[in-house]
Image (cartoon, rainbow, N blue to C red):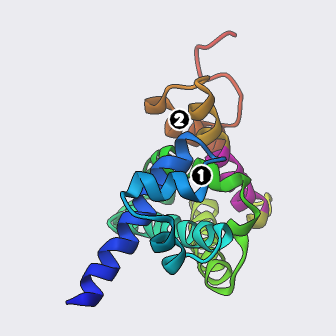
Amino acid sequence: MASTTKSTSKEALLAAAATTLSKNPGASLSEIAAKAGVGRATLHRHFPSRDDLIRELALECLRQTDAATDDIPFEALSAAEGLRRVLEAVVPLGDRYHFLMQEPAAAQGPEITETTERQLAEMAELVEAAKAEGSIAAEVPTAWVVAAIDALVYAAWSAVEDGSVARRDAAALAFRTLIDGLKPTTGDKS
């Protein structure tokens, strides 16, 4: 029973940290502890340093990315539709985790590296399928497309964060940019 309380406490700390840091990326550990309703010593028992907390938040973001895309029925969809659904699932996570893009500790650690590499390999497989079906030009290197998707997710998160793009439009704009580039659509003369 004590491990359940400890686990819940850690989860509550992570939730409080994500909420606090998404609003104020420079928030102190004391502010995060206060938001979680615990003392700073409790926070330090779980996360001895700010970097430890950031790394755990990065892992939580990666876990939530996996969870958000787990229910996508890729085998029943075209690859392009799969890409669209991935963007629709991942872009909304930016509200909670955008601040991690500015945190060097978020990219450190073997579990983060392993999970990120697996996710990028899965994306590369989806890109290869999109190339095979003709949704993405076959001559464009897969690594370039994967990097472009990563950059589009970041751009969507940033644009929503700074208010230049509506939250409801961000994933669709990222998908359009990926699949159609910036060319005008049929009938658009601008």
Percent across and percent down for residue 149 are: 66, 53
136 lies left or right of 68? right
What residue sits right under mark 1 in the picture?
A: 135
Residue shown at 59% from the left, 21% from the top: 186
Q: Is residue 163 magenta?
A: no
- Can you tell which quarter of the image residue 15 is in? bottom left
In this rendered view, identify the residue nearer to me: 119 or 73: 119
Say above or below: 99 vs 114.
above
2 lies left or right of 35? left
Q: Is residue 150 magenta?
A: yes
In this rendered view, identify the residue nearer to me: 120 or 108: 108
Say above or below: 58 vs 103.
below
Element on which disc 2 rests:
helix
20 lies left or right of 159? left
Residue shown at 45% from the left, 49% from the top: 19
45 lies left or right of 121? left
What's under tag 1, amino acid-wise?
Ser
Residue shown at 39% from the left, 63% from the top: 38
Bounds of the magenta span? 144-154
Category of crowding for the residue at label 1, using alpha-carbon neighbours closer than 10 angstroms: few (below 14), some (14–19), many (at least 20): some
Which numbered disc, 2 or 1, marks the residue that appears first in the sequence?
1
What's under tag 2, amino acid-wise?
Ala
Per the model, the C-alpha gap separating discs 2 and 1 is 20 Å
Category of crowding for the residue at label 2, using alpha-carbon neighbours closer than 10 angstroms: few (below 14), some (14–19), many (at least 20): many
What residue sits right under mark 2 in the picture?
A: 170
Can see residue 153?
yes
- For the stretch drawn in magenta, what is the main secondary structure? helix
